[in-house]
Amino acid sequence: MSPESKKLFNIIILGVSFMFIFTAFQTCGNIAQTVITNLNSTDFHGSGYTSMSIIYGVFSASNLLSPSVVAIVKPQLSMVVSGVFYSLYIAVFIQPTTWAFYTASVFIGIAAAVLWTAQGNCLTVNSDENTIGRNSGVFWALLQSSLFFGNLYIYFAWQGKTHISESDRRTVFIALTVISLVGTVLFFLIRKQEDIKAPGEENSTNEIPGDSSSAQNKMTRALAAFKKSIKLSFTKEIMLLSVTTAYTGLELTFFSGVYGTCIGAVNRFGREAKSLIGLSGIFIGVGEILGGGIFGLLSKKNRFGRNPVVMLGIVVHFLAFYLIFFNMPNDAPIAPMEGTDDIAYMIPSKNVAIFCSFLLGLGDSCFNTQLLSILGFLYSEDSAPAFAIFKFVQSICAAVAYFYSNYFLLQWQLLIMVVVGFFGTITFFLVEWKAAAALAARGSDYSSI
């Protein structure tokens, strides 16, 4: 197999592995609050929103150290161990207890930071400036197809149900745990390349196996990776992109946890309300896959760079927010187990609700594929620290959003996303224009990015 074929193979395996793990995790996140609402009449007294806030809060803090962990453990093993912790978190729902639920939330936050830092490193070292756009799109499309499979099962299995029984819950989460473990095992298929360096590693080829200085070399690499993360976080480009990244954290929380809960709480949707959560997840996935395919696989034909894609993303999201504001009851995110009978500015429409799910997925793919692409392009030599900062900002904003989702009405959540999204789009434009100018100075074709 040629080096280029081996790199593409690694990207596909990386995407498929994430597809399995996040088929389980994203389906879990989409239905968690609804399942927990049906559990709160028992001894269990947890909150899906609070759990996700803990996960992303720990995730954000752990991103400061994750490049050092990946430097020592190496990307492949880092992803395998992280995948095991994802599976353990999902398994907690089989027989949930409050203490295990929140403890697992802490551990998966740490694991997520390591997983995504290793993923960013693996994506970058298997790409160059001519293939980073394509590879980002391939990975993103495979990752987001995870929204399709798990939610398809939820749609059919929960159709007509107004209450989620213990049997229903156990069946779903046993299956999701197994699916997550399958994705974890697939990481072992990623082929190692002799020229791939771990983050923070300067020249590992000179390290003699079994040498007594090996541990010291690993700690040196870990410290170097940490210093790079701190240094990069104060650069102009990273600070500007952090506003865009902050927006992706807010809208990630909304489409992955809040919006499905809103749909399931609308009593005017009748007995289909719970199954519509699954259908909503499917159409978010369709939007994600479509966006990843178009803006990734066809990136070579785009002669105008990343800005038009990001502009499309914000327009699509603003349209979705406008329709959701008119269609969904204001108290839907915080409605009790009985749901809500309120209406907004129109009679709640199932078709509009599902169409908005598609728009949320499409807009999210616009932002994330272009952020992955520009980070891989700008920081090809410092991929792990750059992706760690990206995930740090995204996850801390997601944690904040999950926290206020326990209290804020729908209109205020939408307003926050509109304001941050507007400024995030502008800051992305500024970085992209500078990247285009630098590329033009080198005499490269702008379409190659």
Image (cartoon, rainbow, N blue to C red):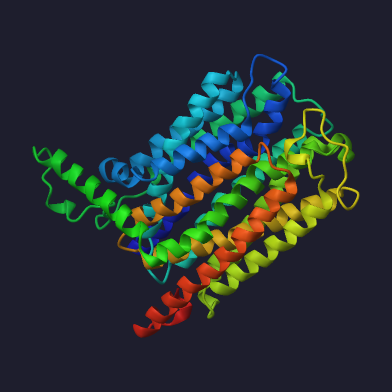
Residue pictured at 65% horizontal, 29% vertical: 172
Residue 187 location, x and y as percent? 41, 42
**Residue 335 falls in which quadrant of the image?**
top right
Residue at 34%, 50% (x, y): give it. 191
Instruction: Classify residue 279 by image quadrant.
Output: top right
User: Residue drawn at (33%, 59%), measured in percent from left and top?
Assistant: 232
Quadrant of the image containing the C terminus: bottom left
Tell me how many marks there are: 0
Residue 317 located left or right of residue 395: right
**In the rendering, at what x and y percent does residue 79 appear?**
40, 41
Residue 77 rendering spot, x and y as whole percentages: 34, 39
Res 219 quadrant in image: top left
Q: Seen from this angle, which residue lies furthest top?
A: 43
- Residue 220 as seen in the image, left or right of residue 109: left
How far from the left and from the top, in percent, is residue 135? 47, 62
Q: Is residue 284 above or below residue 166?
A: below
